[in-house]
Image: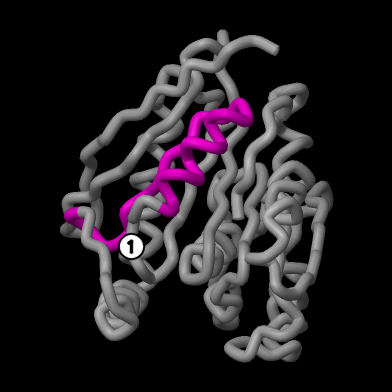
């Protein structure tokens, strides 16, 4: 197997009144352009966890950008602080969309990224955000939500846009925050907006944090159609 050469870069960009701190990772040993993936953080902010996910995606053959949705690289060290950051952000979803789009443009413009093959994955709050962006017609080939905030994927009557992304929702059946009813509503909402060529993959599993291999498999299932032969390395994304 060819040796990898994972490179990383801290980047700065701005959107919706905030200076944003992103983290890019790619394999410099891989030639040519490859799919790009945004990684959207939990309510804790853009911490080492999502940066490690970006590194691991780079090992799998992608260019990955761990985004900063809060601005100034802010992170939380307690649930109360995390809740305040999250609630401030989600109070205006136009801000969410603007900051996501700004990160997507940063990823799209990187020299190693194929701008025709872009995807996004997210965890908890970030999972809800990637579903939200898919529901509002973001130019993505695939999105994957892990234990995501499902209500963010719902669009009010008359809002949203045609969904072009292949969608995977990986959600524990025992989740106490979002009911099965919410899952059904999300599925119905996305189905209404699907373009004819979109494929959907809905997976549900419990105790996913103890089954890291399932998260890796989830990424491979979701992103493999756009990556071609890029998925050769082994990594854990849970």
Q: Residue at x 49, y 65 (%)?
A: 129
x then y, percent, for residue 165: 67, 50
Q: Is residue 3 left or right of residue 20?
A: right
Residue 65: say if magenta.
Answer: yes
Quarter holding the C terminus is bottom right
Residue beneath the point at 36% across and 28% down: 8
Tag 1's secondary structure? loop
* Whether residue 165 is visible: yes
Relative to 140, say whether 69 is above or below. below
Question: Can you give x and y, in whole percent of width and height, for residue 11 in the image?
Answer: 26, 35
Q: Position of residue 93 (x, y in %)?
A: 38, 71
Q: Quadrant of residue 137?
A: bottom right
Q: Nearer the viewer, residue 236 or 8?
A: 236
Measured along the vertical axis of the image, is residue 119 above or below residue 185? above
Is residue 28 shown in magenta? Answer: no
Residue ranking furthest to the front: 210
Between 190 and 110, which is closer to the camera in this rendering?
110
Report the span colored magenta.
Answer: 49-72
- Count the marks: 1
Residue 230 in the image, given as x and y percentages of width and height: 70, 24
Location of residue 232 (image quadrant): top right
Q: Is residue 195 left or right of residue 127?
A: right
Q: Is residue 215 left or right of residue 72?
A: right
Q: Is residue 61 above or below residue 14?
A: above
Q: Which residue was labeled with disc 1?
A: 45
| Other-residue count near label 1 (Cα within 10 Å), few / some / many at <14 / 14–19 / ≥20 | many
Is residue 132 visible in the rendered image? The answer is: no
Give the residue drawn at x 68%, y 86%: 182
Indicate the quadrant containing the N terminus: top left, top right, bottom left or bottom right.
Answer: top right
């Amino acid at each position: 197997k060819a040796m990898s050469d994972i490179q990383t870069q801290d980047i700065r960009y701005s959107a919706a009144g905030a200076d944003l701190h992103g983290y890019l990772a790619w394999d410099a040993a891989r030639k040519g352009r490859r799919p790009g993936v945004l990684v959207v953080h939990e309510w804790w902010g853009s911490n080492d966890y999502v940066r490690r996910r970006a590194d691991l995606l780079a090992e799998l053959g992608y260019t990955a950008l761990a985004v900063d949705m809060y601005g100034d690289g802010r992170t939380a060290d307690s649930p109360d602080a995390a809740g305040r950051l999250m609630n401030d952000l989600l109070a205006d979803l136009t801000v969410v969309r603007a900051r996501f789009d700004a990160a997507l443009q940063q990823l799209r413009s990187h020299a190693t990224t194929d701008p025709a093959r872009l995807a996004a994955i997210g965890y908890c709050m970030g999972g809800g955000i990637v579903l939200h962006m898919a529901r509002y017609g973001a130019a993505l080939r695939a999105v994957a939500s892990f234990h995501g905030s499902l209500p963010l994927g719902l669009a009010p009557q008359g809002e949203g846009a045609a969904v072009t992304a292949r969608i995977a929702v990986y959600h524990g059946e025992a989740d106490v925050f979002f009911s099965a009813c919410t899952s059904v509503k999300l599925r119905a909402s996305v189905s209404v907006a699907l373009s004819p060529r979109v494929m959907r993959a809905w997976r549900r599993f419990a105790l996913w944090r103890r089954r890291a291999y399932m998260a890796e498999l989830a990424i491979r299932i979701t992103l493999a159609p756009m990556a071609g032969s890029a998925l050769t390395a082994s990594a854990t994304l849970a």
